[in-house]
Amino acid sequence: QVQLQESGPGLVKPSETLSLTCTVSGGSISSYYWSWIRQPPGKGLEWIGYIYYSGSTNYNPSLKSRVTISVDTSKNQFSLKLSSVTAADTAIYFCARSGELEPLLYYYYYMDVWGKGTTVTVSS
Amino acid sequence: QSALTQPASVSGSPGQSITISCTGTSSDVGGYNFVSWYQQHPGKAPKLMIYDVTKRPSGVSNRFSGSKSGNTASLTISGLQAEDEADYYCSSYTSSSGVVFGGGTKLTVL
């Protein structure tokens, strides 16, 4: 059973770069789409972007200039970097997989396995 | 891409049915049959409940059903149970090849 676990600093200073890693266990990262989603305190979900196992990416247009998602298949991990952070980037950050919901069919816009989330606070 | 519009809250008694709406535009909900719904209990990660507007992933109760008309999608929960109390989010593929979520609806089981 595939499990995802986010890791990284819980506190980031304004203007610095937020860096998180998602470790995949119980399965290989060398297939499917892998995404980052965030949730500000008491608010709704916001899609950040995804990476395909081959390395192709797609980002939320509102964050595109500040976001980089990368994958390390040798470590079964994928990562998020968000630059020039402000207090508005304070949120719970989730990583998620878009796997097969039907045989051989998977789409990046459906996330079927999620990590538990990690809280990141932007503050000096 | 603007967030999809959901009611802030809905409520119902055990055994009853409730419906949560999700309104977008022709660039997302209305333009594609790629609408999904997620359930999120407090302090937990979201769980996929509906995809492709009407389909349920394996293991999801058939008390959950989805539909769409024009730019509005809906999630219906029948035979309401206490465990259904949670936040529900709709999501859609967008014309810019992205993903947009709704603002979320808090379901209270009375």
Image (tube, coloured by chain):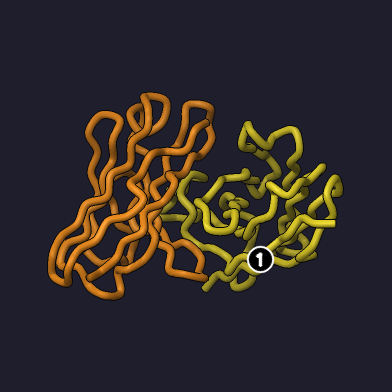
Q: Residue visible at 43% across and 44% down?
A: B102
Residue type (three-letter) at the residue carrying disc 1 = Thr
Query: Can I make out residue A102 in this image?
Result: no
Question: Closer to the camera, B68 or B87?
Answer: B87
Q: Residue visible at 77% across and 61% down?
A: A74
Q: Residue A14: x and y, percent?
A: 83, 49
Q: Quadrant of the C terminus of chain A?
A: bottom right
Query: Can I make out residue B40 in this image?
Result: yes
Query: Horizontal placement of A4 versus A86: left or right?
Result: left
Q: Residue A114: x and y, percent?
A: 54, 63
Q: Colour of chain A?
A: yellow
> Which chain gets the orange colouring?
B
Question: Closer to the camera, A72 or B53?
Answer: B53
Q: Residue B84: x and y, percent?
A: 29, 69
Q: Residue A80: x and y, percent?
A: 73, 51
Q: Chain of mark 1?
A: A
Badge 1 marks a residue whose secondary structure is strand
- Say if A60 sits above or below B106 in the image: above
